[in-house]
Image (cartoon, rainbow, N blue to C red):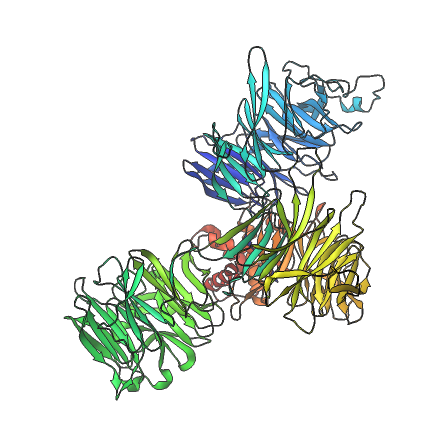
């Protein structure tokens, strides 16, 4: 089975509102597509305190005026619900919910949303239907008094409650008139007894509005504003107007001939004039928020915020619109307090801005005080390793309107680079030292290379070579540390211990002289193989297999114990050891880890048994590979959380929890099952920095303990062989990253996070992207739309540009024709004989107003020279095609293009047009064509197989035999795919228009029919699926990442394949969690079942072949001592077929899943 997990959650903000609780606490509530978050308001900004995943797609969010601290959430069809939530003590609590689904109804085309008054909340999801929800303080929504009523205005543009005092709410409804297609405003009163809306009333007598762009109604100051077009209208409200009763069912069937109709009452074409008007000079209105009774803040599609102010005097009423400034294009606005406004965006970063009464230097009346990263909508993306650090990065085409951008997303710890030096190449290890052991800062660095040691002094930000010193300089240093006595009161001293291959010397840092020495050399042959120092003791391993334990006593070195050589033979010679205590606050260690070459075994031994013959191990574990380094750490949690870590030569870290028990006053130790973490292929060194451990192999990874489990986060530094903690005056809490060519000084900040870097492109919205490893460049197709006033025709242009992968500077750009737009971009090999030769290929279409679908386009080939770099990229070849080039890939050095209904294969040929001096040297020739589809929007290749996605039907597999295309298999039922890619087992992963994921495969190699092997409702529109991962692959993983997907709401997810036994365990756990979690929300099983436009099919009521990784990881949120945990594990035992050895093994399996992202 495959596991679907989220790497980066949806960042597009759907709605926002402010709620005030009865205790006076104020919260900003944000609705994302799949969840709701509560942020407490503080003087310094906002802070998230709660989040709730809803198992539904959020449609709207609004506060309930009569219920402090509560708000209404409505969700999208096909299975919409209305939820009342409350913020209680920084938690989100579900008060009540009701189903608002209308069977057989059509989803509304223009207005889908909610609005409320004191007694009722209204939601609209379907054409001609309105849900009236009776509000109740105890249960949120009183289901018995709530009802679904018909509404005669079918094409509703906007609706609100008329701001008057009335026993029953009166609704203002702006809709498209069926006769003349212009906006018409009518008012109707709710008739609860008849579960209906009454006839048209005369509360607002606007009638038809000539401005066809008008699509918003805003209740304000006992009036209603109609806006959205080029004119903003302030409409009067007649509070004492008559309410026309709704006709009974019997009267509805009678003829209306010769009688007054709704169109004649209060809705005449020539309505009452507005009491005030003002001109709207900006783009289409997207959202608004009320500041106070006479002022509203309005956002347009280009991110401009406009203040509309109503000024009322005894003689007149005026309304003005003033531009405040520029923000991200807003999908939601919420006025908080004291001039603070939250700007939620789908197309750019969300922002917290502060309004001012005076303009700043740029003429703006607002200041952005805080920015919240939003990478939506992701139109396209690539997974690359830009810095060659074996740490994949994602580059996305994000944003739209005025906020187009490339976003570089990387899963790594936050590292601040403090300094860099290349004066000391070939350094293998660094030992920071203090002059006195109790000094606050390190003053010295002892640098060890392959054959020598040198001492540096730290003077501010400068490093100075001391030159000749008391330290042994003609051989490498194996270990060094400040040393204090292990027994007696803690006291400071100037002593430093240096261990080399031939000796251990004690140095007085005050006198800069050697005061004691222990030689370990036989006839000039150095004997020390491995050494480790702590602040009170040292442990050495000799070639003979002897272990030497050293401490400080009476200002001299004291050899405490030495095991007889015959007890440790050469086959079991020590590979690694560590004598540092597991806690950074301890003086000495009671147990120590030792790894031996024989059997690749790591032993846990008691320090107190050093004097005993045989030096027995209290616990041992055989590993899959040899050990390079070991250590013990409790990650700052305490003695109940001690872990044995082993860095292995095959690029893995093995983590084993050490469990201690006491019997008869003697401590016994047991080792749990190991967890393996892959860091590439290079040997791994381990060093501890406070509560964290740095593991350096092919990548640098920080290991730390959080939320009750071991977690990891990579660092964006390369070629690092070791990381050493440093605490100097100018480098507090820093780390030295040792590479063969340089030393880098840095400080690790936050460890578990995705870093997002923005490359702003403004109005040039990136639509397609590809990466060339050879050219070290990106090819990006952009579309630019100039801002215009609402109602004016937009001007659009398109271009293809090549960007340097490091600086993202534009190296080359080509402007396409006026009516031409980039549809696809790929980086493809141009010849089967030279796999390293590649070029950018661009597919386009000519968009003309009189064409239903494009009838022409082009394929353009851009090459790049390896000698002169990406800056010499040029147009190598192009050809015209009969349609839009929706997708591109390659097979056998040929270009495969999806052009309208066909799959075409092209090859590069010499250009024979001699008279065209500027013509490219090459041209594209059509080799073959396969025309058996409706709209080919997806093509991808694997070996000689081509996988085709048809937007109208489904998936096909073709085979290229060198001369023609042959059909291998097809899926015939229409699923409307929007993205696809090939999995490792040659099956197809596809996403469709209904937000589902599907897995297709052939039942047998000879079968010409593709079968659906798995289905899963993601709840998001997937725009791209690509092979890749955000982590280094582990050795023999139970869960292996395969694909990364990207959605229009900014979600990044990973699809991983689990082994059969792991799948059984995870499936049983998923079913168990479904019974325990979120019982007051829509059912998780139903939410993940594949959806159609009509909802979940009765034929399949749950997902198949896929597991929800996000739900599985919530296992860690349940306390092991809770009743929920007991119920969950009881259900797990019932469902589970393949039994796990223990609950710890289940947790380890989930940790592997969590490590994928």
Q: Nearer the viewer, residue 1120 or 72?
A: 72
Residue 616 location (% of width, % of height): 31, 78
User: In the figure, is residue 368 to the left or right of 908?
Assistant: left
- Classify 227 as above or below 528: above
Q: In this view, does 712 lie to the left or right of 589?
A: right
Is 758 on the left-hand or right-hand side of 980? left
Residue displayed at 64% across by 15% down: 238
- For this rendering, which residue is in front, 614 or 386? 386
Picture quarter with the N terminus: bottom right
Residue 257's quadrant in the figure?
top right
State whether residue 723 is above or below residue 560.
above
> In this rendering, does residue 1066 appear at all?
yes
Q: In this view, does 1102 lie to the left or right of 715?
A: right
Q: In which quarter of the image is residue 551?
A: bottom left
Which residue is most to the left? Answer: 554
Picture residue at 48% right of the left edge, 43% below the top: 50
Residue 449 appears at what percent x and percent y?
35, 74
Displayed quadrant of residue 657: bottom left
Residue 382 place in picture, x, y as percent:
60, 58
Q: Is residue 169 visible?
A: no
């Amino acid at each position: 089975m495959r596991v679907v997990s989220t790497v980066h959650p949806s960042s597009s903000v759907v709605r926002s509102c402010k709620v005030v609780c009865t205790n006076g606490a104020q919260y900003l509530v944000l609705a994302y597509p799949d969840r709701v978050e509560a942020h407490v308001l503080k003087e310094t900004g906002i802070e998230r305190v709660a989040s709730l995943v809803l198992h539904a797609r959020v449609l709207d969010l609004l506060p309930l005026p009569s219920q402090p601290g509560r708000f209404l959430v409505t969700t999208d069809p096909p299975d919409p619900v209305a939820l009342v939530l409350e913020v209680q003590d920084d938690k989100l609590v579900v008060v009540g919910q009701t189903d608002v689904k209308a069977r057989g109804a059509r989803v509304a085309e223009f207005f889908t949303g909610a609005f409320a008054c004191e007694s009722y909340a209204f939601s609209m999801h379907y054409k001609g239907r309105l849900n009236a929800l009776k509000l109740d303080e105890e249960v949120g929504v009183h289901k018995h008094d709530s009802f679904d009523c018909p509404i005669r205005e079918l094409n509703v543009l906007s609706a609100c409650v008329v701001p008057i005092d009335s026993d029953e709410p009166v609704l203002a409804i702006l809709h498209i008139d069926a006769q003349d297609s212009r906006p018409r405003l009518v008012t109707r009163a709710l008739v609860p007894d008849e579960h209906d809306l009454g006839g048209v009333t005369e509360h607002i007598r606007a009638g038809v509005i000539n401005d066809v762009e008008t699509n918003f109604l805003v209740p304000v100051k006992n009036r209603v504003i109609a806006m959205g077009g080029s004119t903003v209208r302030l409409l009067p409200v007649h509070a004492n107007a008559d309410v026309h009763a709704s006709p009974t069912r019997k009267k509805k069937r009678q003829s209306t001939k010769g009688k007054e109709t709704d169109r004649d009452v209060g809705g005449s074409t020539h309505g009452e004039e507005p009491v005030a008007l003002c001109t709207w000079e900006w783009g289409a209105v997207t959202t608004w928020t009320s500041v106070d009774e006479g002022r509203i803040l309005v956002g347009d599609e280009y991110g401009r915020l406009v203040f509309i102010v109503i000024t009322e005097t005894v003689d007149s009423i005026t309304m003005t619109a003033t531009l405040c400034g520029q923000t991200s294009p807003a999908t939601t606005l919420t006025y908080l307090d004291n001039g603070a406004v939250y700007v939620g965006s789908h197309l750019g970063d969300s922002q917290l801005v502060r309004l001012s009464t005076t303009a700043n230097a740029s003429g703006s009346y607002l200041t952005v005080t805080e920015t919240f990263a939003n990478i939506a909508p992701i139109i396209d993306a690539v997974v690359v390793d830009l810095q060659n650090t074996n740490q994949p990065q994602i580059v996305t085409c994000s944003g739209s309107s005025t906020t187009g951008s490339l976003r570089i997303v990387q899963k790594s710890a936050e590292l601040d680079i403090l300094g860099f030096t290349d004066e000391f190449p070939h350094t293998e290890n660094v030992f920071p030292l203090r002059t006195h052991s109790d000094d606050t800062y390190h003053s010295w660095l002892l640098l060890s290379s392959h054959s020598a040691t040198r001492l540096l002094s730290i003077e501010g930000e400068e490093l100075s070579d001391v030159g000749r010193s008391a330290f042994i300089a003609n051989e490498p240093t194996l270990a060094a540390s400040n040393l204090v006595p292990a027994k007696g009161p803690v006291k400071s001293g100037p002593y430093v211990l240096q261990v080399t291959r031939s000796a251990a010397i004690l140095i007085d840092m005050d006198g800069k002289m050697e005061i004691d020495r222990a030689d370990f050399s036989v006839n000039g042959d150095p004997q020390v193989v491995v050494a480790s120092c702590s602040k009170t003791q040292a442990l050495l391993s000799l070639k003979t297999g002897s272990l030497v334990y050293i401490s400080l006593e009476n200002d001299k070195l004291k050899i405490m114990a030495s095991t007889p050589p015959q007890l440790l033979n050469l086959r079991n010679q020590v590979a690694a050891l560590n004598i540092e205590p597991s806690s950074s606050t301890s003086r000495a260690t009671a147990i120590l880890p030792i790894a031996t070459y024989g059997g690749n075994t790591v032993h846990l031994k008691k320090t107190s048994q050093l004097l005993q013959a045989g030096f027995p191990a209290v616990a041992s574990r055989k590993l899959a590979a040899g050990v390079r380094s070991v250590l013990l750490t409790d990650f700052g949690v305490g003695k109940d959380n001690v872990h044995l870590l082993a860095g292995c030569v095959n690029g893995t870290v093995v983590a084993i929890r050490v469990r201690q028990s006491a019997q008869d006053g003697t401590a016994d130790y047991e080792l749990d099952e190991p967890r393996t973490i892959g860091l590439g292929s290079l040997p791994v060194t381990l060093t501890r920095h406070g509560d964290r451990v740095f593991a350096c192999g092919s990548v640098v990874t920080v290991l730390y303990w959080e939320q009750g489990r071991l977690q990891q986060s990579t660092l964006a530094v390369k070629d690092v062989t070791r990381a050493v903690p440093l605490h100097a005056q100018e480098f507090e809490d820093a780390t030295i990253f040792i590479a063969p060519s340089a030393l880098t000084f840095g400080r690790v900040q936050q460890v578990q996070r995705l870093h997002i870097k923005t490359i702003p492109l403004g109005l040039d919205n990136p639509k397609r992207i590809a990466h060339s490893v050879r050219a070290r460049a990106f090819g990006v197709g952009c579309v630019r739309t100039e801002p215009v006033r609402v109602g004016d025709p937009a001007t659009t242009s398109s271009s293809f540009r090549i960007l340097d992968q490091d600086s993202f500077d534009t190296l080359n750009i080509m402007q396409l024709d006026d009516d031409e737009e980039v549809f696809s971009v790929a980086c493809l090999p141009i010849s089967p004989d030279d796999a390293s030769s590649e070029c950018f290929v661009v597919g386009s279409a000519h968009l003309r107003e009189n064409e239903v679908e494009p009838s022409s386009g082009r394929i353009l080939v851009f090459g790049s020279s390896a000698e002169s770099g990406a800056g010499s990229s040029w147009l190598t070849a192009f050809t015209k095609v009969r349609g839009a080039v929706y997708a591109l890939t390659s097979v056998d050095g040929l270009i495969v293009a999806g052009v309208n209904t066909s799959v075409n294969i092209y090859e590069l040929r010499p250009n024979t047009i001699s008279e065209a001096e500027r013509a490219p040297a090459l041209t594209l020739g059509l080799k073959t064509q396969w025309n058996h589809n409706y709209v080919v929007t997806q093509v991808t290749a694997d070996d000689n197989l081509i996988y085709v996605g048809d937007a109208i039907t489904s998936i096909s597999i073709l085979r290229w035999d060198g001369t023609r295309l042959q059909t291998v298999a097809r899926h015939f039922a229409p699923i409307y795919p929007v993205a696809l890619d090939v999995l490792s087992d040659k099956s197809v992963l596809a996403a469709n228009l209904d937000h589902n994921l599907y897995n297709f495969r052939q039942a047998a190699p000879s079968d010409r029919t593709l079968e659906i092997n798995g289905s899963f409702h993601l709840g998001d529109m997937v725009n791209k699926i690509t092979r890749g991962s955000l982590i280094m692959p582990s050795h023999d993983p139970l869960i292996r990442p395969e694909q990364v997907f990207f959605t229009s709401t900014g979600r990044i997810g990973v699809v991983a394949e689990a082994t059969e036994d792991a799948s059984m365990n995870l499936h049983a756990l998923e079913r168990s969690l479904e019974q325990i979690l979120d019982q007051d929300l829509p059912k998780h099983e139903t939410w993940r079942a594949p959806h159609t436009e009509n909802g979940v099919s009765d034929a399949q009521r749950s997902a198949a072949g896929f597991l929800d990784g996000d739900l599985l990881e919530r296992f860690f949120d349940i306390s092991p001592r809770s009743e929920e945990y007991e119920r969950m594990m009881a259900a797990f035992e019932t469902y589970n077929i393949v039994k796990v050895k223990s609950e710890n093994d289940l947790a380890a399996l989930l940790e592997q899943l969590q490590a994928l992202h």
